[in-house]
Amino acid sequence: MLYEKLTKAGLSESEAKVYLASLELGETNISRIAQKSGIKRTTAYLVVGILKEKGLIHEIKKQRKTYFYAEDPRHIAENMEQNLQDIKGAIPELLAISNFTDKKPSIRFYEGKEGIKNLYKDILKHPKSEILEWYSESYATEFNESFFVDYFMPRRVKNKIWVRAILPDNAIIRKMVKNNEKELRKTKLLNPEKYNIKININLYGKNKINIISFKEEIGLIIESEKIHDSLKNIFEIMWKADI
């Protein structure tokens, strides 16, 4: 059974049942997840919380009601690299029962450190492209800098993803950008008294924007061509301006 393959990949039996139920139902509430998975509602709520921490289920609020939806099953392989072969065997069947491609939200919310890591892993799905970034030093002061140095950066370079970044001119940032050419990066450093941005914004793909607050451990991906192109225009104005 599918949930047995998921348990081999590191999920508990309850986690596997709840994830499969959420995947098949799409955006839904906790009662339907409990009913579909065959476990008690109180247990389902606890298991959903665990899966949220693992970045496999996300929460969204609409008109004061809370709904949940399963992450793309392909992220499981990324989150559980030690059990990569087991989960790859389950992915075709998971996708077959998933309505993820039919009902993909235009805005996706992420929470916790693992959620933020998934935001950056999404960028890696666009090889041979360019990211436009507004950056702050919070990636180092309020998050796990080693994730960028040891995981994200090498994979970005391997995928030939270039970066143009607007950043504050300070000691932490200057240390980060000392190997610009090698790390496929171009930068524009601004006076930190004028550039007082405390979040990170990344424009990538043809229509994607992710916005991250490392201190609050929250982020989102917006899929909108109009918002993407408008922010890109603002970025280009700042990039060329003498500021």
Image (tube, rainbow, N blue to C red):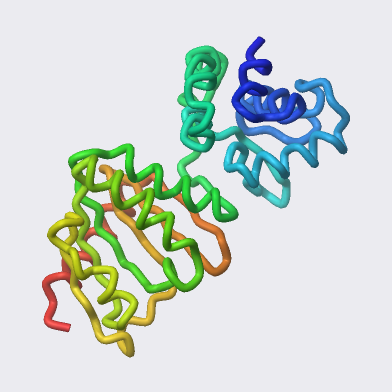
Report the quarter where the C terminus lies.
Answer: bottom left
User: Which residue is at the front of the view, 167 or 29?
Assistant: 167
Q: Where does residue 10 sit, x and y in percent of width and height? A: 64, 29
**Residue shown at 20% from the left, 56% from the top:** 183
Q: Where does residue 181 sit, x and y in percent of width and height? A: 13, 60
User: Which residue is at the front of the view, 170 or 44?
Assistant: 170
Q: Residue furthest bottom?
A: 193
In the visual, does 155 lie left or right of 221? left
Measured along the vertical axis of the image, is residue 131 above or below residue 141? Answer: above
Q: Residue furthest top?
A: 1
**Residue shown at 54% from the left, 69% from the top:** 215
**Residue shown at 51% from the left, 45% from the top:** 108
Report the quarter where the N terminus lies.
Answer: top right
Measured along the vertical axis of the image, is residue 114 above or below residue 181? Answer: above
Q: Quadrant of residue 231?
A: bottom left
In the visual, does 17 lie left or right of 186? right
**Residue shown at 73% from the left, 35% from the top:** 29
Q: Where does residue 88 sit, x and y in percent of width and height? A: 48, 19
Q: Where does residue 24 sit, x and y in percent of width and height? A: 62, 21
Measured along the vertical axis of the image, is residue 165 above or below residue 162? Answer: below
Q: Quadrant of residue 140?
A: bottom left
Q: How many marks?
A: 0
